[in-house]
Each structure stands twice: as structure tokens, then as C-alpha cells.
Image: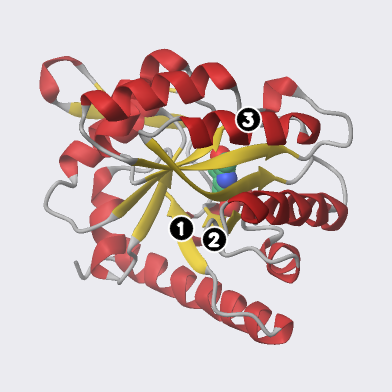
Amino acid sequence: MNDPRTAELAQNLMAVRARIQAACEAAGRPVAKLIVVTKFFGADDVHRLAALGVADVGENRDQEASAKHAQCADLELTWHFIGQLQSNKAKSVVSYADLVHTVDRPGLVKALDKAAHAASKRQDVLIQVNLDPTPRPERGGSAPDDVPGLLDRVLAADGLRVRGVMGVAPLGEDPGPAFARLSQMAALVRDEVPDADVISAGMSQDLEVAVIHGATHLRIGTAVMGSRPNVRYRPVKGGKFNEGEAQ
Ligand SMILES: *Cc1c(COP(=O)(O)O)cnc(C)c1O
């Protein structure tokens, strides 16, 4: 696609890849994986990204993600589910997500395990750790103290395979200490599962800090896609897709 939007995405991607390269080089770390967060943007943009060499995309709402995934069936992409997940959406998410970043409570472990068995799939997951100085359940993520117990549950669920940890920096605070806590949680998980080496951390604003603290996967929205529109992309009845009011 040789349109202005493709040119814009290409330019943004180049800048973000340069930031990632520089940050990883400065930290003496292998180049982290770029996950482009496409929430709010349409399947046409996902096609543009794929044509520009993007291999990984992230979505945070099941309804939007499943619709977009269906519209991108022709693309070889790795789909990351990065949003808070209700147990009743587990079956749907398991049908398209390659990696679920947001396992944060025993009930969700159970639901994902059941869905994975039903789909004859081994579902890769990350344990989401709440990084707020005082845990804020409404932001998602397990309190750090609960991570060992949650990890035991995941290890006991043979439909799931734990690949590492995920975290979102606290709002309005220095992300450094938060990402340092996430790195400790990652080490704790690796003590049990040595190859669970994924640390999903870092967004448009803080990717450099995340890399310093060992991020292997970066979830980048705005810096690639531009500001999110205030309406979400979502399906409408009849299998067609349309813009919808933000929910
Ligand atoms: C939206 C979102 C991102 C991307 O945020 P940007 O600041 O736009 O880069 C990353 N992680 C999660 C969990 C998100 O919901």
C-alpha cells in the first residue's frame, strides 16, 4: 500500500526501531521484540504494518481483537492479548491469541486452562504483576506477594505454558523502580521455569527504562500508530466491521 498512512507508519516504525536498537545497545542487551499495539485502529492498519515487516501485534479487548484477527486471517502474525481479561472471554481469546500477557488470578488460570484443553492447544501465558506501589486491582495484575501462589497454579495447569512476566508502569511515577520490581518477579519465575525468560514491559513513553531493567518484549502503541482515535474499532452485526463508540 503506497498511501500516506503507510508512509506515516513506516516513518514511525523506523523511529521506534531506532529507539529500541539504541536502548538495547546502550544496555548491552539483545534487541527486544517490538509488539505494535493496534487497539482502536482498524484491520487495514494491521495489513499495512504486516507489509512493513511487523510480526507481532497487541490488542487489549476481546471483541475488537477477535474481529480484527478474523479480518487478518491472510497474515502471518503473532497475536498478543495484553488487556484485562474476564474469565468468560477465555475461550474466545484462546482461539486467536499466541501469548496472553495478563494472567493475574487463579480464576483466570482455570478458565484459560479449560479453554486450552477444549481447543487442544497449549496456551502460552505471562503472569501480570501489578507494579503500583500500593497494589491497585482495578489496573490489573497480581500483587507481587501473590505471584508465587499464582505461579504454582499456572504450573499445575497443563493446558498452559508460562513464558514469563508482564507489567505496566504506575501512572505518574518514575517507572524505574517499578520495572526493577518486575525484574525481581521475573527471576522468581525463572527459578521455577528456567526458560520462562519473557519480560513484557515498556510502552511508548518508557521503553528505554524498561530495556534497562531487562524487558524482552515492548508493547508500543502511540509511537507507531499515532494518537488513538476516541472511538474503538469494533464489529457490528452481520459479520461486517465498523467504527463504534468507545466503551
Ligand atoms: C495501550 C497499551 C499499551 C501501549 O501504550 P502506548 O503508550 O500507546 O505505547 C501497552 N500496554 C498495554 C497493556 C496497553 O493497554
Where's the N terminus, which quadrant? bottom left
Badge 1 amino acid: Ile
On the question of residue 83 being in view, the answer is no
Q: Which residue is mark 2?
A: 217
Please state which of the two labelled residues, at mark 2 or mark 3, is closer to the viewer: 3
In the image, residue 74 sits, relative to residue 114, either above or below, namely below
The answer to which quarter of the image holds residue 128 is: top right
First in residue order: circle 2 vs circle 3: 3
Residue at 41% across, 19% down: 111
| Disc 3, SS | helix
On the question of residue 79 being in view, the answer is yes
In the image, residue 96 sits, relative to residue 218, either above or below, namely above
Q: Which residue is mark 3?
A: 150
First in residue order: circle 1 vs circle 2: 1
Badge 3 amino acid: Leu
Q: Is residue 148 left or right of residue 107?
A: right
Q: Nearer the viewer, residue 66 or 97?
A: 97
Badge 2 amino acid: His
Q: Nearer the viewer, residue 109 or 42?
A: 109
Asked whether the residues under the numbered discs 1 and 2 touch, taking CB atoms below 8 Å apart as contact, a structural biologist would say yes
Q: Which residue is mark 1?
A: 35
| Disc 2, SS | strand
Asked whether the residues under the numbered discs 1 and 3 touch, taking CB atoms below 8 Å apart as contact, a structural biologist would say no
Q: Position of residue 233 (x, y in %)?
A: 35, 32
Crowd rating for badge 3 (residues with CA inside 10 Å; few <14, some 14–19, many 20+): many
Q: Position of residue 50 (x, y in %)?
A: 26, 63
